[in-house]
Image (spheres, rainbow, N blue to C red):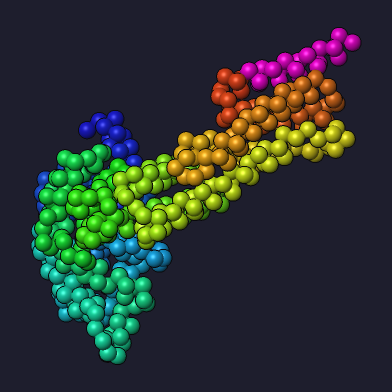
Amino acid sequence: MSQTPIERLKDYLVQLPPQSQALLMREFERAVERGEDTAVATLVLEQLRKVVRGADEEALPRTDDPARLLFRPLEPFLVEGNSAVRAGQVRRASLTPVWQWLSRDGAPEKAREFEAALARARQSGTASELEPAVRKFQLAAADAIVKIAMPGHGGDKQRALARVGAPNVIEDLLPIGSVLQAREALDGLGSRIPGFLRVFGDPQISQVSSAINVPTLQTPQLLPFVLSLVMQRLTAPWQIIRLAVKMAASDDEVRVAATPYGIAVTIALHDLSFLAAGLRTDIKRGHFENVAEQLKALHDGVRGLRTELDLRNDSTWGRQLASIRADISNTLQSEIDSVPGRVRRLLRQRPDKDISASSGVDATEVDETAALIDFVAICRTYASELAINEVTLRTYSDLQQYVEQATEALVQSLRGGDARVRAYRQMQVAAAIRFCEVLFGHDYASLMSRAAENAMTGERKPSRAG
């Protein structure tokens, strides 16, 4: 395989969501362990490991970790941190306490048998017997987990659960056991649905509906994981609600909520809320690199739920969506309102007497302000659906008017003044031209740059003549 196809493969893998990367890695590692034709699997796995772990980290196989082998079916559903999770997710931090409990109390004999099988596989250098051992222990672990996690009463039950871990770990117990128990069914589902659903229209919805029409996958515990698996293959994850609408044969929220697939709407709303929280955090930290992508996802998700579901304003789902829109609007509006003030502080013409030899324009602040102006421009595209239409249009118009006037005035100021003042004005003009490029485009910025050069040249000519 030539270098060019490998680079294209890596570019494709980089663009995949983390959950899809984990899913692919799991499948290719399993193919290697089964001893199948591994040429393609090894190549893709190598590139995946470079993408996931970083190009400079040595891509060592990670299939000799017993806990990782046990919990491999959970990889597509893991989330970082200990915050609240939605249905169809499991905290990664819960896996270590559960593994320790299984080895100590839950299934110690089975755990020792599994580790012995793994040790034999390492020594022999063959992995053909490893997969049956993994599956055997997964079933034993699932039985032990489900047994202790099922609802019950009494102090003994509570004391036994306390030995497993913290409340977050206990909350994840039954989902972990359910996924381990249904590994074959989930693997089968993964092979029956397309790897990438660019358009989730009626043909694709029918295909997915048929694929998940398996009794094992329809249980209340497992269905959220099934929906999460489908969402990872959607270009727009919010479109999972279309499956719920299809199953209910109606867009009325009451009828949708009455079906088991109503959980799809709850999941979509949770993910939108999580995305809005991430946007708020990025904006507070001044990280605007992914804002355009985040705003598009939020805009499309909010519009999709508002147009494809008949939501009542006073219903639980209706209030959740209204809260998400309000949160986005408040986050964006407060940041948008701050931009004109930052621009004016940088471009305001201070009196010559207030400018010293040490006066300067902070390049970092210029970069941040240019990013904020671009942020306002991006918000214009999605303003209506995100309830920021008025403030965005007003702010953008004010910025255009002010920057245009300030730039022209600053360029004219280059024609006079001593070297100390002129040096400071040049820094201001450079900042203004940077803002012009964002607001008016490259051509206008180039025009103002030439005007600034002419102003400087015109100022110096009389001195040389004299």
At a point 12% along the width and 50% down the height, the residue shown is: 210
Residue 456 appears left or right of 174? right
Look at the picture and state if 337 lies above or below 319.
above
Residue 67 appears left or right of 300? left
At a point 37% along the width and 60% down the height, the residue shown is: 315
Say whether residue 92 is visible. Answer: no
Look at the picture and state if 139 lies above or below 367.
below
At a point 42% along the width and 52% down the height, the residue shown is: 275
Using the rendered view, name the quadrant where residue 447 is placed.
top right
Q: Position of residue 268 (x, y in %)?
A: 33, 53
Say whether residue 242 is visible. Answer: yes
Q: Which residues are magenta?
A: 447-466
Quadrant of the drawing holding the C terminus: top right
Quadrant of the drawing holding the N terminus: top left
Q: Is 458 one of the magenta-colored residues? A: yes
At a point 28% along the width and 37% down the height, the residue shown is: 9
Give the overall secondary structure of the magenta segment: helix
Using the rendered view, name the quadrant where residue 173 is placed.
bottom left
Q: Position of residue 67 (x, y in %)?
A: 25, 67
